[in-house]
Image (cartoon, rainbow, N blue to C red):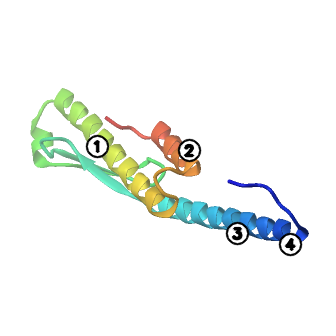
Amino acid sequence: MDFSISNPEEAKQHLRDWKQRADKLAEDTQAAGTAIQRLTATGSDANETVEISLDANGSMTSVKLSTAAQRQSTRHTERAIIEAYRAAGTQLLDRAREAVSSTLGDESPTGRAMIEGIRQRLPTG
């Protein structure tokens, strides 16, 4: 990028261009944040005995147990719950990546920071 400015009008144009890029980044960042806050995800264990839904913050919003879960040992049900929780977390992270990619792009440092913050608070497998 060439930063040589030969006259005041070029300087003004350079500042207008910079402001336009900054405004666009702010708008895209806001759009990504809004999209992420609307996300939900549902995951289940491999046998589909447990299904867990998460909100955008990774908090459980529902837990559903199949009749098969009621017939298996508590230990198996505990494992199924953890597996379903992780599956839901992985799905939520994937959806957040899609939201960030569509607004900020895959190479955005801002987007990568947003995804890392989400990744750190989600249960993934």
Looking at marks 1 and 2 on the same chain, the residue that comes earlier in the sequence is marked by 1
- Vertically, is 3 above or below 122? below
Q: CA distance from mark 1 to mark 3?
A: 40 Å
Q: Amino acid at mark 1?
A: Ala
Asked whether disc 4 touches disc 2, contact meaning CB atoms under 8 Å apart, the reply is no
- Give the residue displayed 27% in from the left and 49% down from the top: 43
Residue that mark 2 sits on: 113
Q: Element under label 3?
A: helix
Q: Element under label 2?
A: helix
Asked whether disc 1 touches disc 2, contact meaning CB atoms under 8 Å apart, the reply is no
Q: CA distance from mark 1 to mark 4?
A: 56 Å
Residue that mark 3 sits on: 20
Name the outermost residue toward the front. 6
- Labelled disc at residue 9: 4
User: Where does the C terminus fall, quadrant-wise?
Assistant: top left
Q: Is residue 12 left or right of residue 35?
A: right
Q: Element under label 4?
A: helix
- Give the residue displayed 20% in from the left and 35% down from the top: 77
Q: Is residue 91 left or right of residue 73?
A: right
Residue that mark 1 sits on: 87
Q: Nearer the viewer, mark 1 or mark 2?
A: 2
Q: CA distance from mark 1 to mark 2?
A: 22 Å
Q: CA distance from mark 4 to mark 2?
A: 36 Å
- Vertically, is 113 above or below 101? above
Q: Amino acid at mark 3?
A: Gln
